[in-house]
Structure formats: structure tokens, C-alpha cells
Amino acid sequence: MNTRPSKIVCVGRSYADHVKELGNAIPDRPVLFIKPPSSLISLEQGISWNPTWGNCHYECELSLRIDRTLKAEADPAKALEAVGAVTLGLDLTLRDLQDDLKKKGQPWERAKAFDGSCVLADWVELSEIKDWKDVHYSFHVNDELRQTGDTSLLIFDIATLLADISQVFTLEPGDVVMTGTPAGVAALKAGDQLTMTLQGQSQEFVWKTFVQA
């Protein structure tokens, strides 16, 4: 499926260790925000941002492609049936700008939804996922391990997230859900080489991109 998403729904504060590292409160329901289609870029394009906007942080996340319409689904198990493929993605965040917006009580879009703020790897078949509560992935910068993802540690499991999202936003074929990032986020710098690795049932999937100089 090559359908461009109508939207990219992102989940914030979904891992407790990441919530703590940013000094936020543990949420009592999923924290949701949206990136527009214009935020999406390919790995080959590399990562760049306007340096006058301040630091740009990486956030590696398990990402889901929706292949069937999902609307107001109360049953988490049925909500999972809408997922057609998985991959890893980078939710890029202009952290200095985000912190400033938070202090002013303003929306985050300038820091989270700018052009190029969503980087997705190639889609992987669902047969590679044996158990949604036991998916593992990692993120390296210049061959140094920075993040390890384990869906068993999500505050809200994948099925619950999808059911909750569907109460607010109708998910359409081609839409993407980014399920949140574990601890270990930090600023990127020019020339960084980035590697995302997803542990599939039959093999390991590895994708690379870079930060433009």
C-alpha cells in the first residue's frame, strides 16, 4: 500500500521512563497529537531543520500503518485488526521550541509537525509481529545505543491505544500511528549517522539515515 496518509497520529508520554526524563506527569489517558502529511519524509532525504529553531531531538517509535477504516471501536482486539503493517519511525522534536511553547501555554505544532518531522522506514509485514506486547526495537547514533523499545513497557498497550484514538479521530487507510518513544532522547547534530533496528519474528530489520551537515 502506497497511500499517502491523511494524517499521522502520535502518542506522547507512552513510556514511563521517557515521561520521567522530561519531568512530565504520568498520563491517565493517552496523550495524542497529529502531524500533517507534509511532515513525512523518506530516510534517503536525510534529516534537517532550521538551526534558528534550536535543538532537534530524535524520538524512535514503533509505527503502525492503518489498512482499514477505524472509527469509534470500543473493542481493543478488533481495533488491532485495522493494522496492516509496522515499521520504525522518528518523531523529530524541536525541544527548545517545544519547551518555550509549553511555558506560554501554546500548542506544540511548530515543534512537532514541521516539514520533515516524521521519518518512516520501510513497511514490514504483520507476520513479523508475534505478540504486540512483546515487540523490541533499538536506536543507535553513530553506532552508540541510545534507545531500546519494548512494548511490554507501554503505559497503554497497542490495542488500547488504537481503540482510544478511534474514539477521537477516524483512522483511514494509509494513516500512520506512532506509538511513542522510550527514554534516551537527545539532540541531534550535523553528520550524525542514525540506525533503527526492529526485531522481527524471522529476521532483524535495520534502517539507516543521517543528519545533513
Image (cartoon, rainbow, N blue to C red):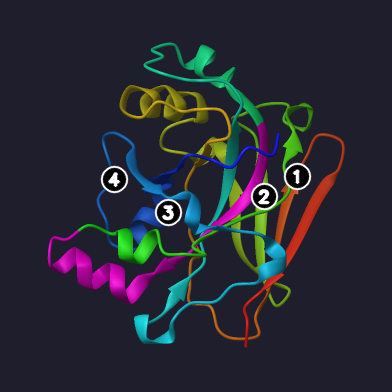
Q: How far apart are marks 3 and 2 (CA)?
A: 16 Å
Asked if the residues shown at circle 2 and circle 1 are in contact, with their CB atoms under 8 angstroms apart, the answer is yes
Earlier sequence position, callout 3 versus callout 2: 3
Mark 3 closeness class: few <14, some 14–19, many ≥20 residues within 10 Å: some
**SS for callout 4:** loop
Q: Where is residue 85 in the image (x, y as percent from the top left)?
A: 68, 33
Q: Residue 199, which numbered label?
A: 1
The residue positioned 49% from the left and 62% from the top of the image is 117
The residue positioned 71% from the left and 34% from the top of the image is 1
* Number of the front mark, 3 or 1: 1
| Image position of 131 (left or right of 158) | right
Q: How far apart are marks 4 and 1 (CA)?
A: 27 Å
Q: Mark 4 points at which residue?
A: 26
Q: Is residue 144 above or below residue 165?
A: below
Q: Name the residue under label 2.
A: 137
Q: What's the amino acid at mark 2? A: Tyr
The residue positioned 48% from the left and 59% from the top of the image is 183
Quarter-wise, where is residue 42 in the image?
bottom right
Q: Distance between the residues labelled 2 and 1?
A: 6 Å
Q: Where is residue 112 in the image (x, y as percent from the top left)?
A: 38, 60
Mark 1 closeness class: few <14, some 14–19, many ≥20 residues within 10 Å: some
